[in-house]
Image (spheres, rainbow, N blue to C red):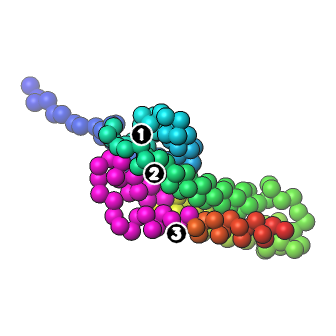
Amino acid sequence: MNASRTTTAPSSSAPSASRRFGRRLGGAVALFPLGLFALLAGLGGQSGSARRVLRADPGTSSPRVLTQALLTVLLGVLALILAGILALGIARGLFYGFVDSGPYDDSWGGPSRTGAWLAHFGVSVPICGAAVGLLYGLAALHRRMTAPLRGEHRPAWVLPTVLLSCAAAALFLVAFVHQLD
């Protein structure tokens, strides 16, 4: 008789790298609604719900949870700005020929539709890559920012980075709105 050989299949419980990457991007985009829910729940006296949403330890104080919820809302606004840039980059880059029907005489890469499409695609690829990278980093920054809620140590550079990132996003948003006029 042959000895039975056991082969182990890859574990389905451990998510793949692409799944973890997608989960982190989705988590970054969901920061605003989650933070807003936690903030409203905490202000409404439902601190247990706020703690669960922010994955805080049960003994975490309510003021600390509210502060982290407010910071999560700020990071969520930044994530939504980045998601908007990503959506705009995809729409105006990859799908440029569908969103602009021409004429392409004054477009980048014009006067042909193919040239305009390639020019817009070439510009949008690095912008979309940067937006995806920043969203991924934003999720990691949020995880480090909420470390005290889980009883972990938060590095000293995290809070200033969060505040500077939110200030930079506010300046970007104001500049973007002013250029629309």
Residue 164: mark in rendering: 3
Label 1: which residue?
51
User: Magenta stretch?
Assistant: 138-166
Asked if residue 145 is among those painted magenta in the image, a careful observer would answer: yes
| Badge 3 density bin: few <14, some 14–19, many ≥20, Cα 10 Å | few
Q: In the image, residue 165 lies at what x, y percent?
A: 53, 66
* First in residue order: circle 3 vs circle 1: 1
Q: In the image, residue 146 lies at what x, y percent?
A: 40, 52
Tell me the CA gap for discs 1 and 2: 10 Å
* First in residue order: circle 2 vs circle 3: 2
User: Which residue is outermost to the top?
Assistant: 1
What main secondary structure does the magenta stretch of the protein show?
helix
- Viewer-proximal residue among 14 and 35: 35
Give the side of residue 15 with respect to residue 92, left or right. left
Query: How many marks overall?
Result: 3
* First in residue order: circle 1 vs circle 2: 1
Residue 26 in view here: no
Tell me the CA gap for discs 3 and 1: 25 Å
